[in-house]
Image (cartoon, helix red, strand yellow):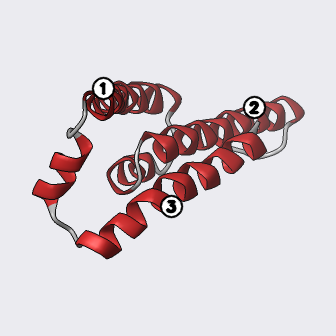
Amino acid sequence: MKWVYSVFCVFGTILPWSQLGPWLLQHGLSIPLLIQDAFGQRISAFAWLDVIVSAVVVLIFITVEGRRERVRHLWAPFVAMFTVGVSLALPLFLLLREIRIEQRANNRLNANTGKPGAD
């Protein structure tokens, strides 16, 4: 699954920025205009509100699950959320969690075979 999450991290970065980048080049970092354009039509407001709710849920999930699984570099999905969005933050967290689960499994295997390895 690590490669799948990695691929989604790439697409989750490229696709949103392929739209935001040209907009920023044309308008600069105009927050009022960004909000006006984002919520200018009901359908775009629908999409943005869906993304905002999803982002909050994902941040809660990252915090709770990340602490429970003791995921390393837990700050990275938060940075991803506020620089790209859910499309990068979620697959990045899932990748980090998968790496952590794999490390823990290897540590248990090493403990069972007498090889050194700490959780």
**On-image quarter of the N terminus:** top right
Q: Which circle's residue, 2 or 3, is located before the other in the chain?
A: 3
Label 3 CA crowd tier, 10 Å (few <14, some 14–19, many 20+) = few
Q: Residue at x 63, y 55 (%)?
A: 10
The residue that appears at 38% across and 50% down in the rendered structure is: 75
**Label 2: how many residues lie within 10 Å, few (<14), some (14-19) or many (20+)?**
few
Q: In terms of sequence position, does the residue under pointer 2 or pointer 1 come before the other?
A: 1
Amino acid at pointer 3: Ser
Q: Nearer the viewer, residue 41 or 105?
A: 41
Quarter of image, res 55: top left
Pointer 3: what residue?
A: 18
- Location of mark 1 (residue): 46
For residue 14, above or below residue 107: below
From what the image shows, is residue 66 above or below residue 118? above
Q: Which mark is residue 105?
A: 2
Residue at image coords 78%, 38%: 106
Please tell me whether mark 1 sits on a helix, a strand or a loop.
Answer: helix
Label 2: which secondary element: helix
- Name the residue located 63 percent from the left edge and 42 percent from the top edge: 95
Residue type at tag 1: Phe
Task: Verify CB contact (< 8 Å) between mark 2 and mark 1.
Answer: no
Give SS at disc 3: helix
The image shows residue 118 at horizontal and vertical percentages of 65, 42
